[in-house]
Image (cartoon, rainbow, N blue to C red):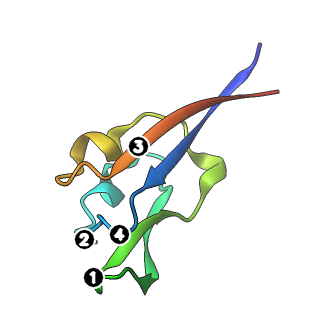
Amino acid sequence: MAKIRGAVVVDVEGCKGCGVCIPACPSEVLDLAKEVNGKGYNYSFMKNPEACVGCANCAIVCPDGVISVYKVKVA
């Protein structure tokens, strides 16, 4: 049986770095980047991508709707 792994894609330029997605993640996958986007905000990124289960909690709580979650089958 194939395992499922999640992949989080953040629209870096649309993210305002509010951090609401970080505590919403049960696997502690997300964090705010030290770099800033074009608007001067620290954006969310996957600091621990191997732990993502694709639950999409981060996308659900994102007030700006800039997070997409995909599920990928891994062998």
Q: Nearer the viewer, mark 3 or mark 4?
A: 4
Position of residue 58 relative to residue 41, above or below, is above
For label 2, the residue is: 16
Asked whether 27 or 34 is in front, the reply is: 34
Pointer 4: what residue? Answer: 13
- The residues bearing labels 2 and 4 have C-alpha atoms spaced at a distance of 8 Å
Which of the labelled discs sits on residue 39, or is there none? 1
Residue 71, percent from left and from top: 56, 30
Q: Amino acid at mark 3?
A: Ser
Q: Quadrant of the C terminus?
A: top right
Residue 16 vertical placement versus 34 (above, below): above
Give the alpha-carbon distance from disc 3 to disc 4, as whole Å: 14 Å
The answer to which of marks 1 and 4 sits earlier in the sequence is 4
Q: Position of residue 51 (x, y in %)?
A: 60, 47
- Density class for disc 1 (Cα within 10 Å; few <14, some 14-19, many ≥20) is few
Identify the amino acid type marked 1.
Answer: Lys
- At numbered mark 3, what does the secondary structure look like: helix, strand or loop? strand
**Relative vertical location of residue 38 with respect to residue 59 in this rendering, above or below:** below
SS of the residue under disc 4: loop
